[in-house]
Image (spheres, rainbow, N blue to C red):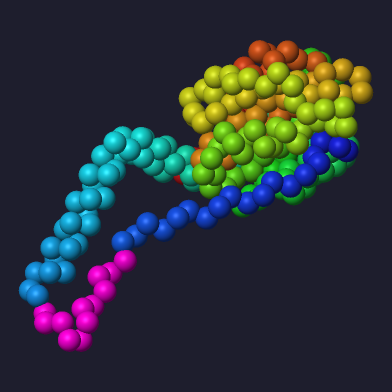
Amino acid sequence: MVEDIFGGRRTGDREPIDVTPQPDRPGRPDEPDQPGRSTRTRRIVIGSLVAAGLLGAGLFGSTGLRMLQQKDASLTTPDEAAGLVRDDSEQARDTAEYLRTAFAAGIDLDRSTAAVYRDTEAPDRSVLVFGGTTMLWSPERDLDTLLELVGDEEGAVAGLRTVPAGSLGGVMKCGTAPTDDQDMTACGWADHGSIAVALFPGRSVDESAELLVKLRTELQQRD
């Protein structure tokens, strides 16, 4: 499962379109100056832009506010999180590093991290979490793309559905990823500043979703 968890690379997002109005072009040399012409033209352009944007102003405002609130994020892997203990054994560190490297190859990130968290009461229910931070223009689309890469040759994540994302907002989704032995729950979150996926062997979708919300509140910080 781990060796085939990623199978492709996401194409980069298109650059934002620059909609800054261009300066007024100077008049022709044989054209007499007309006082106030440039000012009047600018007022007409600005008025047209305002009128055209009135319907979308509320949507843009709420989206812009979310981006400002979420864009400066960081992820850490504390010793303990959500009742689980970070596994620092050599095997766990190797697995985490493999996941981190594969994750970074699947999506462009400024920083990436990964860790294995052990359930002291049930060693076979350890949680593998890997994620990173960057400015995401379309969090849900990027999360869908990443979850499509999770799985093996038998198929990708199935039954994907949106689940409550908790107080940090953004979008969170869960589904099941096939493995050789049994299906494994895969959940992930994304907002405008971070994205992460966790694998939950031996846990249901509902249990995994609830646990990921708790893990996220201890792994993610915002400046």
- Seen from the viewer's position, the closer of residues 210 and 156 is 156
* 184 versus 111 height, above or below: above
Q: Quadrant of the N terminus?
A: top right
**SS assignment for the magenta stretch, majority:** loop
Taking the view exactly as shown, the residue that stands out farthest to the right is: 180
* Residue drawn at 52 percent across, 22 percent down: 166
- Residue 188, can we see it? yes
> Which residue ends up furthest to the front in the rendered image?
30
Extent of the magenta region = 22-33
Q: In the rendered picture of this protein, how many numbered marks are placed on residues?
A: 0
Residue situated furthest left in the rendering: 35
Q: Is residue 222 left or right of residue 87?
A: left
At a point 21% along the width and 78% down the height, the residue shown is 27
| Nearest the eye: 69 or 28 | 28
Q: Residue furthest bottom?
A: 29
The image shows residue 83 at horizontal and vertical percentages of 67, 21
Q: Which residue is at 72% across, 33% downward?
A: 148
Q: Residue at x 86, y 37 (%)?
A: 4
User: Measured from the top left, where is residue 126 in percent x and y?
Assistant: 79, 24
Above/below status of 118 relative to 26: above
Res. 117 visible in picture: no
Is 28 included in the stretch rendered in magenta? yes
In this picture, is 213 found above or below 27? Answer: above
Q: Position of residue 65 (x, y in %)?
A: 37, 39
